[in-house]
Amino acid sequence: MTRTTLRLTDGYPDVSPFLNGEVKALQRELQRWGYAVKPDGRFGPSTQSAVKSFQRKQGLRDDGIVGTKTWGLLTAKQATQSTGGGFSTAVPPAQTPVISTGADGRFFPLSRIFSESWSKGAGAFGSGRNGRAHAGCDIYAPLGTWVHAIANGEVTLGPYYFYANTYAIEVNHGDFVARYGEVQKDSPVRKGDKVKAGQRIARVGHLVGISVKSDMLHLELYKGTASGALTVKGAASAKSPAGLPYQRRKDLMDPTPLLAQWRKNLPVD
């Protein structure tokens, strides 16, 4: 069945009343996926917001326009209610990885290990950085590689500008907070989105203006026992055993031993 491309203001009596039925069909599909929209046949701001949220969760560009791809995913049979209110989105394999259990339900953030870059040399936690210590682990991977959520959680910030033309996303995973850094600006998740372990949340970005061996995911972990911005300069910064500042919050953690565990449980792209 061919569907009409829909966008903001469609279905309104003074704009395109002939699209009222199509917009109602869209709104009913959004309701099926758990969105609290009224099927009034008018593509207003609340319907647009629901469409954008759906698109982000499916890895599409969140432009709020319901074209062929968005219609195809909306009308997929899978739409399952999750526990604790709200709905989870079960979509075709091309959009969401097949997730297995293991490693305490947590995943390595990439589906492949391209290099042991995070455990030695410049990419290791605590390595020297011109008077400061490296605050995370650099996991080398090709540009555009999917980054996956380590565990269930909620996006608390991002994507926001991070470093050398790359971006970062912060996720509260419950018993720890992760900053997924040096990723691309266009991400399928935004602040306030719930994420599932193994879900695609970003793509590896490209560092501009500096010389590095590879593009990478820069991963930082925090205990969650402190509050405020993760980047902290001056006396308030956490320090390495050698006394070098990490320029990060006091509850900074070394991801290295945890990555050694999670590498046994790779997500599926």
Image (spheres, grey):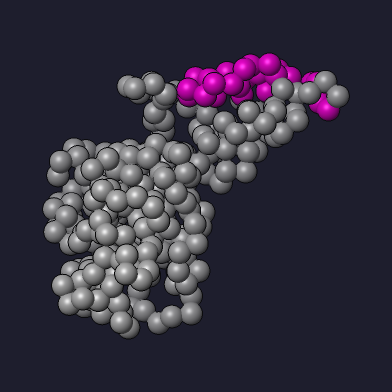
Check the image and report above or below for 244 versus 154.
below
Residue bounds of the magenta highlight: 15-41
Q: Using the rendered view, name the quadrant where residue 110 is placed.
A: bottom left
| Closer to us: 135 or 240 | 240
Quadrant containing the N terminus is top right
Residue 170 position in % (x across, y down): 39, 51
Q: Is residue 33 magenta?
A: yes
Res 59 seen here: no
Q: Is residue 40 magenta?
A: yes
| Closer to us: 180 or 269 | 180
| Closer to us: 17 or 172 | 172
Residue 178 position in % (x across, y down): 31, 52
Q: Residue at x 70, y 34 (%)?
A: 7
Left or right: residue 255 versus residue 186 is left
Q: Residue at x 37, y 40 (%)?
A: 154
Residue 177 position in % (x across, y down): 30, 49
Left or right: residue 55 versus residue 133 is right
Check the image and report above or below for 37 versus 56.
above
Left or right: residue 198 versus residue 161 is left
Q: Residue furthest front?
A: 235
Q: Residue at x 46, y 61 (%)?
A: 167
Check the image and report above or below for 61 versus 205.
above
